[in-house]
Image (cartoon, rainbow, N blue to C red):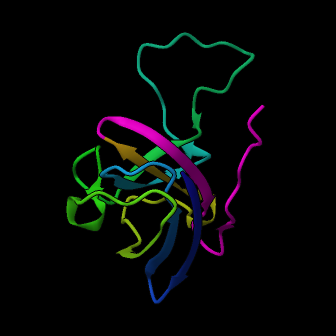
Amino acid sequence: MGITAKSIIEDGMVKVNVGLKIHETDAYNIQIAVVEDNVTAYQDNSERIKLYDFKKHHHVLQYALFNDYLGKPLNSGKDLESYSYYAEHFEFEIPENIKKIENCRLVIYVLNGKHVTNSVEINIDGGVVPFEYEKAE
């Protein structure tokens, strides 16, 4: 499974285009999550360790586009055929709990059943990732 994605923010909306190159015929779901770095939050019951700042957190899940962690069924839940291309567009408002949008990224993952088949990470504004493949040995 190959994933390509492009994201931009316009008028307070995150707009994401996702393209998939299907490797195996199957039914797939997609989930898009917003993660944020450099979130300042104090932790209770942690000892102070001088080597690490426990007030700064990275990869903090701030929002998931779909309520179910398994995401949204693609193609109305019907199988996508091997060697086909599938594209979909998603839009959502910038979540209110975001501290700094410039510290955010999108994590896009595709699942078949409960298993992640592939994922990509892009900047939330102006992020682009082309299809990437590793050569099988």
Residue 63 at what x, y percent from top left? 37, 54
Work out which residue is located at the far bottom of the displayed protein and give it.
11
For the point 22% across and 47% down, which residue is it?
Answer: 68
For the point 60% across and 65% down, which residue is it?
Answer: 4
The count of marks equals 0
Left or right: where does residue 30 sit relative to residue 36? left
- Tell me which corner region of the image, top left, top right, bottom left or bottom right, holds residue 80: bottom left
For the point 52% across and 61% down, which residue is it?
Answer: 83
Q: Which residues are magenta?
A: 113-137
Instruction: Name above or below for residue 100 compared with residue 110.
Output: below
Viewer-proximal residue, 110 or 123?
110
Left or right: where does residue 96 sit relative to residue 53? left
Residue 82 at what x, y percent from top left? 46, 56
- Tell me which corner region of the image, top left, top right, bottom left or bottom right, holds residue 77: bottom left
Viewer-proximal residue, 28 or 108?
28
| 124 magenta-colored | yes
Residue 132 at what x, y percent from top left? 71, 55
| 109 magenta-colored | no
Viewer-proximal residue, 49 or 68?
68
Q: Quadrant of the C terminus?
A: top right
Left or right: where does residue 51 sit relative to residue 109? right
Residue 39 at what x, y percent from top left? 55, 45
